[in-house]
Amino acid sequence: MKLLLTSDGLRNPTIIKAFLDLAPKPVDELKVAFIPTAQNVKSGDKKWVFDQLTSLKDLNVKQTDIVDISAIPKEMWLHRLQESDVIFVNGGDTLYLMDCCNKFGLTQEIPELLKDRVYVGVSAGSYIATPDLRLCSGGDASTKALNLTDFGLQVHLETAKYGEAKSEAAMRERTKGCPYKVYALDDQMAVKVDGDQVELVGEGKYLTIEPSGA
């Protein structure tokens, strides 16, 4: 399985290189399915959505198809994901996104899809790849996620907007009792997964917090 789990997208050359290393084709042949679903319940300015689309445009990928799994029938979105090389799941409301994955069928389809595709997550899109949603805003350990990894994530480390991750001390308190390793990433970092190989990539700050119990 090939995953690139980012805090804030393809923000710097090191993360971009990791993306291109995982990609199954040259960048100008890549077809990307961009899933914006998590932003549907977020109000206000959406420039952050366009930022992710712009990053793909600037890379000169062959195709970026916007595929909202909550807006069209499963047979339509599934066909479009099957036509893609990269499934790019953008940020927004993590709990809503996970609910949509369960309700509309992506949870059931993602293991087969990722046998020969790359998964890129941004914020909420990264959280849902983990075992559960205990570390996202409003989440808890009882809300299961896609379980694509055996580690957890905290994104937006030391970002003023997200007080729960404001410092290393806050993170260590927040992860007490967590039964798996957690990577806390600032907005310039990502986790690259290529089969059994897990690598922290980027040009920012991260913390690795070891499990502390069930």
Image: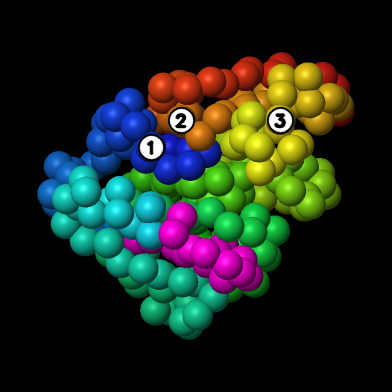
Q: Which residue is mark 1?
A: 11
Residue at screen point 57% across, 29% down: 185
Percent x, y for residue 79? Answer: 35, 72
Disc with the residue nearer the chain's start (2 vs 3): 3
Residue at screen point 47% across, 29% down: 189
Q: SS for tag 2?
A: loop
Task: Count neighbours of disc 2 (C-alpha within 10 A) and say few if under 14, some if 14 to 19, many if 20 or more.
Answer: many
Q: SS for tag 1?
A: loop
Q: Which residue is mark 2?
A: 188
How far apart marks 2 and 1 lie (CA) works out to: 6 Å
Residue at screen point 70% across, 58% down: 95
Let me know if residue 101 appears in the view.
Answer: no
Left or right, 50 with respect to 213, comes to: left
Percent x, y for residue 55? Answer: 30, 48
Whether residue 37 is in magenta: the answer is: yes
Task: Count neighbours of disc 1 (C-alpha within 10 A) and say few if under 14, some if 14 to 19, many if 20 or more.
Answer: some
**Residue span colored magenta:** 33-49
Disc with the residue nearer the chain's start (2 vs 1): 1
Residue at screen point 43% across, 37% down: 4
Whether residue 97 is in magenta: the answer is: no
Q: Which residue is mark 3?
A: 166
Percent x, y for residue 12? Answer: 34, 32
Q: Are marks 2 and 1 in contact (CB under 8 Å)?
A: yes
